[in-house]
Image (spheres, rainbow, N blue to C red):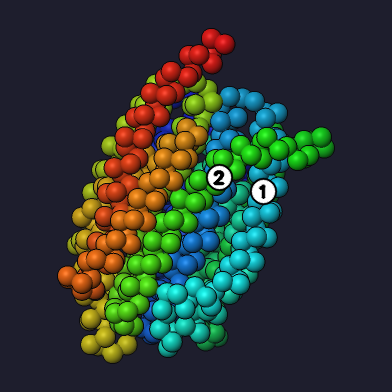
């Protein structure tokens, strides 16, 4: 369980990026595996209505999960920069501030999440036949938000130090546990969607404990007695890094919630098909998320070490790797997508075929445009690692506008399939902000770094 820290300021950039990204990718495969199994067990054992109930809460769940991931990822940027600069004292103080802010975030988010469930369900127009089931599922998940915060904080800190293997081990352990508990609670004990939620919570607790123990075994991270005090300036710095990333995820989630509210108006069968593909969404972007996390660490460490040319080389390499990866995944999904989607659906033959038609149309469209999503993750994460979290926030606002505009306008012309374009248009809009933003940020760094070094 010992952490395996790694400096990314030396060595061939593309090799270093893949060295960190591949364990993350494998970890994400296991994470998505238990998401897929969770969906398949619920869909096959409990039927289309239960699957639709889970689908109505996907974006609401991501709203709070994205907030947590954004905050903890933003806080870890400073730790990555301190590690690249080899400033252990600053790194320990950053660690203390990260723990303090994470405790506050856990308390606030848990309270807000549990209180707002009924109100948000009404706003989303959740169908009455699945509203109660969805509400029970959310209450169990949201009660465990402190566990989610702990896991994400520990995993992000370890990744900031170049250790992607410990989060991988934690995710493998968590995924296997989740799958076994899913089968036990849902298929054997017949606890319904509540059993799926409890299985997820227990597996997250295991992953959180694993990563936390590993994190505090890194001695240079552990703050001394005099370093736990409230450092207002450092707290403000971490908030400037974390809040925009968190806000960006929230904005994206709000757009997704609006799209889901439109989807809810097309009936339970359409919702089930849409949900089946949404669960595969995670598989589509597994590698993109992994490259993104690797690029945040890579850019942060190399900025701390003042290795500006390495940053440029690394971003170019990651973009090429991302495009090649996305094309390969797209081909697999277009050829085998229908077979995979059938794993999630059961019930009346006519309902299953209708849901499958909806699901595959959505999957095929996203697969064709997947390279756009991969560029988005690489460039956005590089900007965040460089300390620029404002441009990614603006890109999130553009994603919101693209999603909601498409969901509001297009269904009047082409009906339900219009919502499939919401994701693609959001990706395109974000890239139009992020790519020019990256080049502008690098120009600023070119001007600033020589001045700092000479001073």
Q: Do the residues labelled 1 and 2 touch (CB within 8 Å)?
A: yes
Residue 210 position, x and y percent, is 63, 54
Secondary structure under the numbered disc 1 in the rendered image: helix
The answer to whether one can see residue 258 in this image is yes
Determine which of the numbered discs, if any, sits on residue 16 in the image: none
The count of marks equals 2
Secondary structure under the numbered disc 2 in the rendered image: helix
Q: Distance between the residues labelled 1 and 2?
A: 10 Å
**Residue 223 in the figure: left or right of residue 7:** right
Residue 418 position, x and y percent, is 23, 67
Residue 448 vs residue 69, the one in the foreground: 448
Residue 71 vs residue 338, the one in the foreground: 71
For disc 1, the marked residue is: 101
**Residue 151 in the figure: left or right of residue 395:** right
Residue 227 position, x and y percent, is 77, 35
Residue at the spot 61% in from the left edge and 25% down from the top edge: 86
Looking at the rendering, which quadrant does residue 242 occupy? Answer: top right
Answer above or below: position of 366 versus 95.
below
Determine which of the numbered discs, if any, sits on residue 242 in the image: 2
């Amino acid at each position: 369980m010992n952490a395996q820290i790694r400096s990314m300021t030396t060595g061939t950039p593309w090799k270093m990026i893949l060295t960190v990204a591949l364990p993350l990718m494998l970890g994400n495969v296991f994470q998505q595996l238990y998401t897929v199994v969770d969906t398949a067990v619920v869909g096959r054992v409990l039927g289309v209505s239960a699957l639709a109930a889970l689908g109505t809460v996907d974006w609401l769940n991501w709203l709070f999960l994205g907030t947590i991931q954004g905050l903890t990822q933003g806080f870890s940027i400073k730790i990555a920069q301190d590690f690249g600069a080899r400033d252990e004292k600053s790194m320990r103080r950053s660690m203390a501030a990260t723990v303090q802010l994470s405790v506050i975030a856990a308390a606030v988010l848990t309270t807000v999440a549990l209180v707002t469930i009924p109100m948000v369900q009404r706003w989303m127009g959740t169908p009455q036949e699945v509203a109660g089931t969805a509400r029970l599922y959310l209450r169990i998940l949201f009660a465990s938000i402190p566990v989610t915060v702990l896991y994400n904080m520990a995993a992000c800190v370890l990744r900031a130090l170049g250790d992607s293997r410990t989060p991988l081990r934690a995710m493998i352990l968590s995924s296997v546990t989740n799958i076994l508990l899913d089968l036990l609670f849902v298929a054997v004990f017949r606890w319904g969607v509540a059993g799926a939620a409890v299985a997820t919570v227990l597996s997250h607790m295991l992953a959180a404990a694993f990563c936390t123990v590993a994190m505090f075994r890194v001695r240079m991270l552990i703050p001394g007695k005099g370093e736990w005090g409230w450092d207002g300036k450092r707290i403000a710095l971490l908030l400037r890094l974390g809040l925009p990333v968190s806000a960006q995820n929230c904005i994206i989630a709000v757009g997704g919630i609006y799209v889901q509210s439109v989807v809810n108006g097309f009936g339970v069968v359409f919702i089930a098909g849409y949900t089946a593909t949404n669960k595969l969404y995670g598989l589509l972007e597994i590698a993109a998320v992994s490259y993104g996390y690797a690029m945040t660490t890579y850019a942060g460490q190399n900025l701390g070490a003042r290795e500006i040319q390495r940053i440029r080389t690394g971003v170019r390499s990651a973009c090429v790797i991302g495009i090649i990866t996305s094309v390969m995944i797209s081909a697999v999904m277009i050829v085998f997508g229908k077979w995979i989607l059938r794993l999630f659906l059961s019930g009346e033959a006519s309902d299953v075929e209708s849901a499958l038609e909806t699901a595959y149309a959505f999957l095929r469209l996203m697969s064709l445009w997947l390279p756009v999503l991969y560029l988005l993750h690489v460039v956005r994460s590089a900007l965040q690692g460089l300390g620029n979290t404002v441009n990614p926030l603006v890109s999130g606002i553009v994603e919101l506008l693209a999603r909601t505009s498409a969901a509001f306008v297009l269904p009047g012309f082409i009906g339900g399939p219009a919502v499939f374009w919401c994701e693609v248009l959001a990706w395109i809009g974000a890239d139009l902000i992020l790519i020019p933003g990256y080049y502008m940020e690098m120009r600023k760094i070119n001007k600033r770094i020589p001045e700092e070094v000479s001073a």
